[in-house]
Image (cartoon, rainbow, N blue to C red):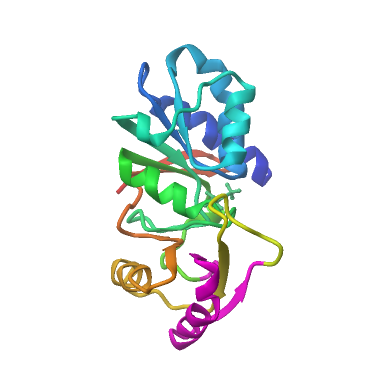
Amino acid sequence: MNQDDMKRAVARAALDEIVPGAILGVGTGSTVNFLIELLAERRDDIPGAVSSSEASTERLNAIGIPVLELNAVEHIPVYIDGADEVTPQGCMTKGGGGALTREKIIASASDRFVCIVDQSKLVDRLGAFPLPVEIIPMAEALITRSLRKRGGRPTTRKDFLTDNGNRIIDTQGLTIKDPVAFEQTLTAEPGVVTCGTFALTPAHRILVATPDGTQTIDC
Ligand SMILES: O=C(CO)[C@H](O)[C@H](O)COP(=O)(O)O
């Protein structure tokens, strides 16, 4: 079983998380792309979706699932999204695809976050994956210095703007011992829109694809 087979398998397992008749929160990335393909089978159960990126919106529209503005929606029972790293406690690093800010907003608006990953993403501690931080462009040098002070090696993502028109700084080499404190302090820095550490909006359930089947971790 290769990585794409595992992504497809975990996406299929996530179909059981859909609440029929309710708005579904949909994330971004290659694992979610497999999910969106499969959502075509469940179109009648899904009156609409809230999407975390223009890319996912386009795919949802292509299969005929209406995409609603978050401002027009009162209740999202489930948000399904991938991650770049996730601990068994549900803390994640996200934003490899650059959609972290909208992802965090929808995660915070949803009752439950179901994280779908293949086994390569499950880690004991966050930090091996370079941390994405979305920033207001005029703060690039300021935040770069701050990330260096935290012990990291920051680089601005080349030729990339987020759906919100901002830049991303990716930082290697950070040690994130306390993800909650780390997220609180970094997101409090002026110029930071948000960071890819999801500790304040953790996953409630992780579906992990392995070659032997999909495992469920309730956090
Ligand atoms: O946070 C994300 C996008 O901003 C994705 O969930 C994360 O990058 C995982 O993507 P993939 O499923 O392609 O490995």
72 in magenta? no
Q: Is residue 138 above or below residue 73?
A: below
Who's the residue at 50% across and 75% down the image? 139
Q: Is residue 21 above or below residue 202?
A: above
Give the x, y percent position of residue 151.
47, 86
* Count of numbered circles in the view: 0
Q: Is residue 18 above or below residue 70?
A: above
Q: Quadrant of residue 162?
A: bottom right
Q: For the view shown, which residue lies furthest in the top direction? A: 44
Who's the residue at 30% across and 49% down the image? 219
Give the x, y percent position of residue 28.
55, 43
Q: Quadrant of residue 36?
A: top right
Q: Is residue 178 left or right of residue 44?
A: left
Give the x, y percent position of residue 84.
53, 56
Who's the residue at 36% across and 29% down the image? 72
The range drawn in magenta is 128-157
Q: For the view shown, which residue lies furthest in the front direction? A: 138
131 in magenta? yes
Q: Is residue 7 visible?
A: no
Q: Indicate the quadrant containing the N terminus: top left, top right, bottom left or bottom right.
A: top right
Give the x, y percent position of residue 87.
40, 58
